[in-house]
Image (spheres, grey):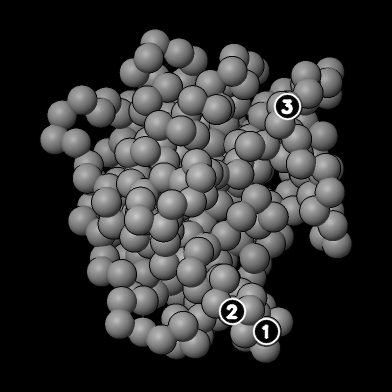
Amino acid sequence: MFHTTANIPAATAAGTAESIPATNEATRLRLFCFHHAGGSAWSFSGWGQWLGRGVEVVPVSMPPRSAPAAGVPGAVSTMDDLVREVTRQLTPFLDEPYAFYGHSMGALVAYGVAQRHIAAGRRPPACFVAGAHRAPHVQAAPDLTVGLSDRASLELLLGLGGAGRLLRENPVRMKAAVQRLREDLRVCATYRHPAAGHRPLPCPVHALLGQGDPLVREADAAAWRMHTSAGFSFRSLPGGHFFNREHKDLFFAELGRALGMVEH
């Protein structure tokens, strides 16, 4: 379920961890990171080096997402099921100061986990950062991959900056990447914001958006301010939907600023 960034180097996937070691004396905050649609825990490789020793980066590996008919063991098919399972597995590790960062789909999953965790009377996050996603109460945009071929879907993903040239050149990887993307978007489409029951998060919320993001309007990202009873900030950064990869120095400066505001 979990990885540490030390176990996710750029060239190897070795070191998958089923539990998180105790924080060392230099660590003041654990940052749980939730990946975008079609992504994985590898999306956060190297983040620890950017954020420094005070922040322990913990990428969250979500359970498989698949339609029920596919019969994939342990797979979830709705956003509710995904949030419930991730919350169940994360709960034992949220007893020390922690923060959430979710990118695109990951922001929606992280928000759901935070809501379920708080509703159970448990410790809230010290900070919540949403990247490249509208506020959860804003109506979803249509699935852009509906009716598109695998190659066209991948071209869309490539255009958003979320895949590399090797995926386009390797048909097997291409098909697997597009399938993950389709399944994740289908799960996202099942999300229904509750009319009641969700309270504003009792922690600061920070929303980040790429200035050229074709999927998220600025007003929709800024609407995250409605989901906190504490402080709020909104930053628009150069780049598109994956601005965090395009301008790493600016992105990590903003993320570090948000995490640095956490009282400890």
Quarter containing the C terminus: top right
Amino acid marked by disc 1: Asn
* Distance (Cα) linking label 2 and label 3: 32 Å
Circle 2 residue:
174
User: Between 179 and 54, which is closer to the camera in this rendering?
Assistant: 179
- Residue at the spot of label 1: 170
Badge 2 marks a residue whose secondary structure is helix
Is the residue marked by circle 3 packed among few (<14), some (14-19), or many (20+) residues within 10 Å? few
SS under mark 3 = loop
Dot 2 amino acid type = Met
Visible residue check, residue 210: no
Front tag of 3 and 1: 1
Q: Tag 2: Cα neighbours inside 10 Å, few (<14), some, or many (≥20)? A: some
In the picture, measured across the screen, residue 53 lies left or right of residue 31, that is: right
Residue lying at the far top of the rendered structure: 121
* Label at residue 49: none
Which of 225 and 161 lies nearest the eye of the viewer? 161
Q: Earlier in the sequence, mark 2 or mark 3?
A: 3
- Residue 244, percent from left and from top: 60, 61
